[in-house]
Image (spheres, rainbow, N blue to C red):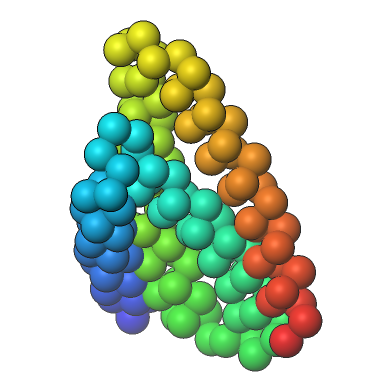
Amino acid sequence: MNYLAVLVGGGVGALVRYLVSIFIQKFVPNFPLGTMVINTTGAFLIGFLSIYLTEVIDAPPNIRLLLITGFLGGYTTFSTFTLEGIGLINNGDYLKAFYYIVGTNVIGFLFVALGRFLGGLL
């Protein structure tokens, strides 16, 4: 049952990541904003759910696997983030690379903290 939870969650998370990314790229085609949005919202969600599912509602392990390991594992795209960051550097877009790498990390850390805080309020 645990394997199925991770499989289903991961598939749905990957599909949502793809849809969000192509939607955002239509509006900002020359910057990997889609990946940045996905990584930062994923950071928020993992912070929130890590508290909410364990300390607020005491969700069963298979639900935690479905949402955190599965969905968020499929949704977040750290490997894509690093590849796109290197691509910006290789293309000589050093300022964009700086904003992208630093922005994603700073916002990601802040959103994990915010998610944990808000999850603890429930």
Name the residue: 35% across, 48% down: 34
Taking the spot 34% from the left edge, 29% from the top edge, the residue there is: 84
Using the image, determine if residue 4 lies above or below residue 10.
below
Percent x, y of residue 105: 59, 38
Q: Position of residue 107 (x, y in %)?
A: 61, 46
Number of disc labels: 0
Task: Residue 18: give x, y in percent of width and height.
Answer: 23, 56
Q: Report if residue 104 is visible in the image.
A: yes
Q: Nearer the viewer, residue 86 or 79?
A: 86
Name, please, the residue furthest toward the bottom.
57
Quarter of the image containing the N terminus?
Answer: bottom left
Q: Quadrant of residue 32?
A: top left
Compared across the picture, whether 78 is left or right of 99 comes to left
Q: Is residue 59 above or below residue 40?
A: below
Q: Is residue 85 above or below residue 38?
A: above
User: Is 80 or 1 nearer to us in this picture?
Assistant: 80
Q: Quadrant of residue 29?
A: top left
> x, y percentage for residue 110?
69, 51
Question: Residue at 39% across / 15% down in the picture?
Answer: 93
Residue closest to the eye, 31 or 43? 31
Image check: 107 left or right of 95?
right
Q: Is residue 3 visible?
A: no
Report the side of 22 relative to 72 (left or right): left
Quadrant for the C terminus, please.
bottom right
Query: In the image, what residue occupies the spot 40% across and 75% down?
Result: 66
